Amino acid sequence: MSDRYAVLGNPVAHSKSPQIHTAFARQTGEDLSYTAEHVESPDFEAAVGRFLQGNGKGVNITVPFKERAWALAQWRSERAEKAGAANTLYRLEDGRLAADNTDGVGLVRDLADNNGVTLQGARVLVLGAGGAVRGVLQPLLKAGVQSILVANRTLSRAEALAELFAADGTLAACGFDAIPAEPFDLIINGTSASLQGELPPVPAAAVVAQTACYDMMYGAEPTPFCRWAREQGATQVMDGLGMLVEQAAEAFQVWRGVKPETARVIADLRRAMTA
Ligand code: NDP
C-alpha cells in the first residue's frame, strides 16, 4: 500500500493541496496518496495521531490549527520554532512528532525565483500581523531585506512581532494610520482583509511603478489589494498562488527528499482557476 499524506483543517474542502501534491507525486514518480481531511476542533490532536500511523507519513496543517500543531510537536525545525506555528508534521525515525513551517520559504521562493523580485537590500512593508506574517518574517530577513515595517490594524500585535524578531534584523511596527507616505520596494499584504473584499488603508505614496506588490491571498479574480496596486501604477503585482505551491513543494521535499518542479503546477492551477 502506498504512503498516505493529508491536509488537516476546518474548513478544508476547497484546499488545492491534494491537487498540488498529486501533481508532484506524478512528476517525481513517488508512490503516495494525498487527501483533504476535515477535522473538528476538539479532535485535532487525536486526528493527527490517528493519521500518522502505519502508512500515514505526513500531514499539512491549515486554518485554524497551525499553532496547535506547533504545540503538539516534540521536535521543531528552527524556522517552525521561530514562527510559533507549523504547517507540516511527520514522524522522526525515533517516533517523535516533528514540525516544520514551509510558508516563509514558499513566499521567498515565489518572490525571488518565480517573479525575480530583488529582496537583497529591499525596504519592505508588511501588512498584517497574524499567523501567516509570523511565518514569513524570518525567511524575509534571512533573504537579506534591508528593513521590514509591520503595519497592522491592531497595533499591539505588530509591536509584539517586531519585538520577537528584533534580534534577526531591522524590524519596526506601526498602525495603519502611521504608515509613512513614501515609496517601498516591496509591499506584502498578509492580512485577510481581501477575504471580506476590503483593503488595508495604505497611503498611495507608498507605491510607485517599481514597487513590487504581493497579496498572500489568491483567487480566480484579482484580489482588492492587487487591483488597488495596479491602480496606483505598480507594474509587478502578484497573488499568493505561487506561495501556496512553493510551500507545498518544500513540504514534499521534507517528507520525500525530492524537490518537485513548481512552474508547471502553478501554471496548471492558474489555468484551472480562471477557466
Ligand atoms: P490571521 O487570522 O492569523 O490574521 C489576519 C490578519 O489580517 C490580522 O493581522 C488582522 O488584523 C488582519 N485583518 C483581518 N481583517 C482585516 C481588515 N478588514 N482590514 C485590515 N486588516 C485585517 O490570518 P492568517 O495570517 O492565517 O492569513 C492571512 C492571509 O494570508 C489570508 O488571506 C490567507 O488566505 C493568506 N495565506 C496565504 C498562504 C499562501 O500559501 N498563499 C498561506 C497562509 C495564509 P488584526 O490583528 O487587527 O485582527
Image (tube, rainbow, N blue to C red):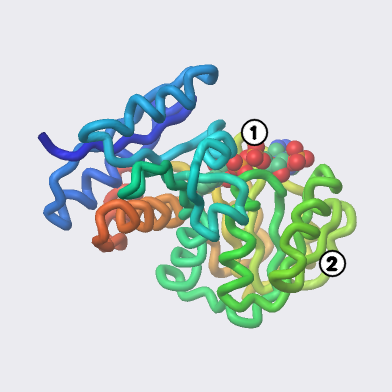
SS at badge 2 = loop
Q: Amino acid at mark 1?
A: Gln
| Identity of the residue drawn at 51% across and 45% down | 86
Q: Is 124 on the left-hand or right-hand side of 62?
A: right
Secondary structure beneath dot 1 equals helix
Whether residue 5 is situated above or below residue 9 in the rendered picture: below
Tell me where residue 251 appears, x and y as whole percent.
37, 52
Mark 1 CB lies closer than 8 A to ligand 1: yes
Q: Residues within 10 Å of mark 2 (few under 14, many from 20)?
A: few
Q: Quadrant of the N terminus?
A: top left
Nearest the viewer among 105 and 223 is 105
Asked if 120 appears above or below 218 in the picture, the reply is: below
Residue 225, compared with residue 63, is above or below; it is below
Task: Classify residue 227 as left or right of residue 177.
Answer: left
Residue 185 falls in which quadrant of the image?
bottom right
Q: Is residue 2 left or right of residue 24?
A: left
Q: Position of residue 134 (x, y in %)?
A: 64, 52
Q: Which residue is mark 2?
A: 181
Residue 255 location in percent, x, y? 30, 51
**x 85%, y 46%: residue:** 156
Image coordinates of residue 55 in percent, x first then y, are 21, 35
Label 1 Cα crowd, 10 Å radius (few <14 / some 14-19 / many 20+): few
Mark number, residue 196: 1
Residue 9 in view, yes or no: yes
Q: Residue at x 64, y 69 (%)?
A: 186
- Name the foreground residue: 242 vs 62: 62
Residue 199 visible from this viewpoint: no
The residue under the point 85% across, 56% down is 174
Quadrant where the C terminus is found in the figure: top left
Q: CA distance from mark 1 to mark 2?
A: 25 Å
Mark with earlier residue (1, 2): 2
